[in-house]
Image: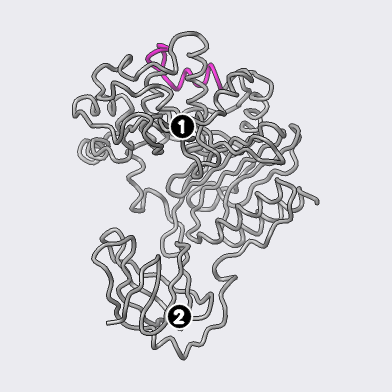
């Protein structure tokens, strides 16, 4: 298999289909097999994407925060069994340990639920940092969601606390610690913790994230997701900016023990354990969630440590084949609403990097089947639905030669197109579930509703 040709063809086709706008890199044994850039890096589509364009990593950042913790553990300045109250006595989490924070098993509330962040941003027109979040948690006494080790629940809040603990123990700003102790020793040129909404853009070579609304890409700041700006002052869970070449250097730095030893990495690749002995995050994150990584034990390739990242308009992926010396980096700054297309793109690249033949990447338009339009009229009308649910289908109707639906989602009315993909069965771009019409009713998302 010519992996270089296959991967390049894959991503150029994905760009043409509106699925991918960004950069990629795949390497084996430290040698680049395929790399490239497609699309644009600015809001106005005037600046072509470059291979060295910097991207916000989103949650891939967590592995770097975990490494920062490990460096302080090595120096004896903190322990994985230290509780968070050792460093912040007023926090209402006396039994939550550093290990719990690293493995999302501490019950720390999700940062993005903290009303104080949005309130500060909206009323005072300023961005609150992680230190402000700690003050809020301490003053308000925000209770944990569950007892430490009781279950796994992914939360950015735990990594915000870790960043503050690292800064407090090290005696320097988190941004400085990361640069001097991790990025520079790893040879990660131009990599930094950045807060571009509050501090400004250091260059025009930073990819700008765009969301998709009604089939059109718009700036995050012009969408309902503009609230993400309010969280720009946080650290630990996000806000490392870098490029594909720096991430390749990170892969090599791990293998060559430039920052953390192989023994320390073995610990970082070991999934956390819940109180009942099961692996934290098992299933959701492969064989379990370790220190900033999801871990998979593959029968052919051995351990694979990976993590994705997502923010409105942004999706990232870093896959470090621990035992097979392969690495994959994907950085994308344009949102695609087509869930089938996104999954088939990932499935195809996953096949290539594991020496398998990839399947065709399809958008929902590619799998549309001929439909007996004479039956559409029988599908149209208003439908009964339960009072509560993820989606409440309200009405089906024809418009411009296509079938459309109106539904209630998160207390708002939404309109979307229904694409015929089977006998009496229709799909929606933004969801996996289908809508099947028969006998005067429609079944979707495990709910059957009758026409009124």
Identity of the residue drawn at 47% across and 18% down: 176
Rendering coords of residue 263 (x, y %): 61, 18
Q: Earlier in the sequence, mark 1 or mark 2?
A: 1
Q: Can you say whether 182 is above or below 195 in the image?
A: above
Find the magenta span and give its range. 167-182
Considering every residue shown, the one lying at the far bottom of the view is 374
Q: Can you say whether 106 is above or below 358 in the image?
A: above
Tell me if residue 375 is in the magenta stretch.
no
Marking on residue 264: none
Q: Is residue 422 visible?
A: yes
Rendering coords of residue 322 (x, y %): 66, 31
Marking on residue 277: 1
Rendering coords of residue 284 (x, y %): 49, 44
- SS at mark 2 in the image: strand
- SS at mark 1 in the image: loop
Q: Nearer the viewer, residue 349 or 223?
A: 349
Residue labelled with disc 2: 402
Query: Left or right: where does residue 84 sit relative to residue 17?
Result: left
Q: Nearer the viewer, residue 219 or 243?
A: 243
Magenta: main secondary structure equals helix
Q: CA distance from mark 1 to mark 2?
A: 52 Å
């Amino acid at each position: 298999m010519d992996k270089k040709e296959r991967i390049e063809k894959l991503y150029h086709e994905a760009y043409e289909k509106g699925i991918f706008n960004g950069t990629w890199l795949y390497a084996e044994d430290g040698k680049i097999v395929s790399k490239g850039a497609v699309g644009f890096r600015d809001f106005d589509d005037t600046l072509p994407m470059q291979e060295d364009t910097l991207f916000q990593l989103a949650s891939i950042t967590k592995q770097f925060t975990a490494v920062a913790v490990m460096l302080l553990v090595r120096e004896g300045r903190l322990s994985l069994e230290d509780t968070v109250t050792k460093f912040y006595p007023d926090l209402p989490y006396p039994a939550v340990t550093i290990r719990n924070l690293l493995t999302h098993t501490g019950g720390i509330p999700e940062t993005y639920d903290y009303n104080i962040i949005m309130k500060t941003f909206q009323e005072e027109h300023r961005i609150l940092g992680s230190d402000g979040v700690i003050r809020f948690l301490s003053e308000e006494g925000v209770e944990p969601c569950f007892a430490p080790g009781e279950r796994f629940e992914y939360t950015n809040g735990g990594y915000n606390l870790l960043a503050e603990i690292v800064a407090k123990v090290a005696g320097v700003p988190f941004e400085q610690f990361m640069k001097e102790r991790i990025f520079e020793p790893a040879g990660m040129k131009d990599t930094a913790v950045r807060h571009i909404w509050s501090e400004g853009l250091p260059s025009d070579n930073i990819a700008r994230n765009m969301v998709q609304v009604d089939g059109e890409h718009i700036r995050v700041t012009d969408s309902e997701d503009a609230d993400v700006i309010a969280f720009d002052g946080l650290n630990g869970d996000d806000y490392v900016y870098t490029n594909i070449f720096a991430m390749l250097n990170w892969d090599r730095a791990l293998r060559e023990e430039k920052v953390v030893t192989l023994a320390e990495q073995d610990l970082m690749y070991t999934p956390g354990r819940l109180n009942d002995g099961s692996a934290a995050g098992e299933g959701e994150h492969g064989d379990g969630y370790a220190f900033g990584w999801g871990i998979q034990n593959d029968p052919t390739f051995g351990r694979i440590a990976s993590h994705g990242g997502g923010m409105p308009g942004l999706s990232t992926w870093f896959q470090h084949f621990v035992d097979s010396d392969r690495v994959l980096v994907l950085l994308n700054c344009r949102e695609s609403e087509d869930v089938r297309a996104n999954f088939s793109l990932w499935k195809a690249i996953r096949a290539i990097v594991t020496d398998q033949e990839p399947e065709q990447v399809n958008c929902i338009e590619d799998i549309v089947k001929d439909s007996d339009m004479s039956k559409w009229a029988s599908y149209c009308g208003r439908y009964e639905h339960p009072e509560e649910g993820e989606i409440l289908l309200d009405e089906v109707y024809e418009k411009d030669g296509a079938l459309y639906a109106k539904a209630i989602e998160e207390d708002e009315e939404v309109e979307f197109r229904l694409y015929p993909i089977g006998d009496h069965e229709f799909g929606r771009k933004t969801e996996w579930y289908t809508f099947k019409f028969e006998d005067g009713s429609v079944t979707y998302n495990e709910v059957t509703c009758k026409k009124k």
